[in-house]
């Protein structure tokens, strides 16, 4: 009897190492498979966008200090191949990584801006005159806001990236019928929008809200895209998406930095996003100048204080 018990124990001891080795082999093959998939999808995305890889523009970002929010100037440009273009979208993404907190500041493109070295024009003219560095300097001086990095995307690239990260479409509750001057026809109601449709939604301004309504929709689009990027079901699309950003997005971030920030956002969990628009309500008026057209004249000190307070919360 005792001899049978010893044999049983010996048999169990032999089985356990075998089970452990089996699980190790399974996990090893799984890791290899995930690695191959990630590299392959990244390469596919890279090749899709790498028709003419975009070189970083001249940009001298402010130094990011320990514990400081990281401010990224995000620009959307409607370019049709011309040398100079104006920015249709101007946002600061301010990220407090430690507290997993993202704040977004949108700047109206018709703000009457003091552009260093030039006559005052609309804010989006700064990019036309001196690309991203001059726009950065203009925002720096007007609002006392440090800018550490930039990212620029044209509209065609935006459409492609949306379709990569969310091939089934992005869920948006379209608040009204839209079609004028946006290249697509959207009907009121909840629907999944393709990249082209989502861009059209973000650009629509042919209603009583004008540019203010458009800025609000741009902010909504950024939020739903953030949710799509961080959703579990879209994680398999991320390697291809990150690969495509190499050719579709101009930025001063290195390739590894871009990947690291996407992974940081995913690992940190749900990324909260608060939004504000400059100018804030009650701090501006409309004027018309011969050289600049219809502009928004704002109280700079009031808006500067509002930005400072917003980022402190």
Image (cartoon, rainbow, N blue to C red):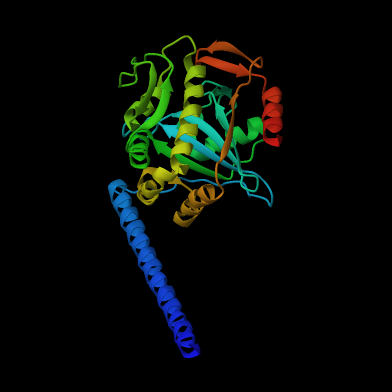
Q: Is residue 26 above or below residue 240?
A: below
In the depicted view, which residue is nearer to us: 171 or 284?
Answer: 171
Q: Is residue 124 above or below residue 251?
A: above
Residue 163 screen position, x and y as percent: 33, 38
Residue 34 screen position, x and y as percent: 37, 60
Residue in the image at 37% along x and 41% along y: 165
The furthest residue to the bottom: 3
Judge from the rendering whether residue 93 lies leftward or rightward of residue 161; answer left or right. right
Residue 168 screen position, x and y as percent: 32, 35
Q: Is residue 18 above or below residue 64?
A: below
Tell me if I can see residue 292 in this picture.
Answer: no
Classify residue 286 by image quadrant: top right
In the depicted view, which residue is nearer to us: 180 or 81?
Answer: 180
Residue 276 screen position, x and y as percent: 60, 27
Tell me if I can see residue 232 in this picture.
Answer: yes
Judge from the rendering whether residue 311 lies leftward or rightward of residue 118; answer left or right. right
The furthest residue to the top: 208
In the depicted view, which residue is nearer to us: 28 or 279?
Answer: 28
Judge from the rendering whether residue 283 lies leftward or rightward of residue 159; answer left or right. right
Viewport quadrant of the C terminus: top right
Classify residue 178 by image quadrant: top left
């Amino acid at each position: 009897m005792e001899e049978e018990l010893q044999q049983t124990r010996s048999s169990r001891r032999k089985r356990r190492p075998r089970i452990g080795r089996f699980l190790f082999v399974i996990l090893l093959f799984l890791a290899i498979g995930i690695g191959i998939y990630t590299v392959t999808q990244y390469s596919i995305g890279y090749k899709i966008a790498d028709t003419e890889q975009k070189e970083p523009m001249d940009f001298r970002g402010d130094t990011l200090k320990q514990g400081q929010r990281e401010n990224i100037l995000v620009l959307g440009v409607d370019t049709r191949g011309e040398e100079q273009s104006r920015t249709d979208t101007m946002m600061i993404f301010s990220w407090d990584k430690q507290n997993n907190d993202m704040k977004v500041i949108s700047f109206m493109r018709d703000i009457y801006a003091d552009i260093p070295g030039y006559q005052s024009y609309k804010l989006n003219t700064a990019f036309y005159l001196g690309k991203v560095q001059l726009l950065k300097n203009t925002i720096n001086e007007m609002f006392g806001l440090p800018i550490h990095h930039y990212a620029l995307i044209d509209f065609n690239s935006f459409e492609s990236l949306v379709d990569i990260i969310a091939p089934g479409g992005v869920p948006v509750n379209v608040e009204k019928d839209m079609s004028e001057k946006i290249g697509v026809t959207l009907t009121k109601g909840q629907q999944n929008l393709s990249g082209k449709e989502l861009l059209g939604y973000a650009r629509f301004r042919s209603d009583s809200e004008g540019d203010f309504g458009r800025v609000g929709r741009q902010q909504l689009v950024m939020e739903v895209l953030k949710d799509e990027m961080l959703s579990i079901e879209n994680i398999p699309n991320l390697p291809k998406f990150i690969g495509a950003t190499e050719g579709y997005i101009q930025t001063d971030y290195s390739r590894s930095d871009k990947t690291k920030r996407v992974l940081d956002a995913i690992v940190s969990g749900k990324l909260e996003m608060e939004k504000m628009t400059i100018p804030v309500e009650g701090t501006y008026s409309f004027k018309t100048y011969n050289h600049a057209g219809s502009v928004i004249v704002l109280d700079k000190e009031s808006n500067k204080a509002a930005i400072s307070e917003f980022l402190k919360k």
